[in-house]
Amino acid sequence: MKYKWLKIMALLEGTSLLLLLFIAMPLKYQFGIPEAVSWVGRAHGGLFIAFNLVLVSYVLKGLLSEMQGLKGFLASLLPFGTFIYKAKVLK
């Protein structure tokens, strides 16, 4: 499997962003539980950095083009982006 680690990281990063946006933030702003954003936010930040480091390593190894790497970075900024990136670019 050529993109094994990148696919795993895409799923983890995308899931953490969705948890942050759709679970942790409503818990903070609607129910007054700021700890949810604190914990999930830290996890997402670490996974965001890890995904992009893995992405850069694939580009540097020549397994992805620079354009595919740029698309991956941009996808990591959008909700559902890494899921689409995994399905379209890493097929």
Image: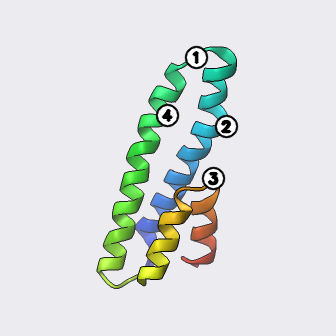
Q: Regarding mark 3 in the picture, which secondary structure is present there?
A: loop
* Residue under the image location 50 percent in, 20 percent down: 35
Badge 2 or badge 1: first in the primary sequence: 2
Q: Regarding mark 2 in the picture, which secondary structure is present there?
A: helix
Badge 2 or badge 3: first in the primary sequence: 2
Mark 4, residue position: 40
For badge 4, the amino acid type reads Val
Callout in the foreground (3, 4)? 3
For badge 2, the amino acid type reads Phe
For badge 1, the amino acid type reads Ile
Q: CA distance from mark 2 to mark 4?
A: 11 Å
Q: Are marks 2 and 3 in contact (CB under 8 Å)?
A: no
Q: CA distance from mark 2 to mark 3?
A: 10 Å
Q: Quadrant of residue 51?
A: bottom left
Mark 2, residue position: 22
Q: Are marks 2 and 4 in contact (CB under 8 Å)?
A: no
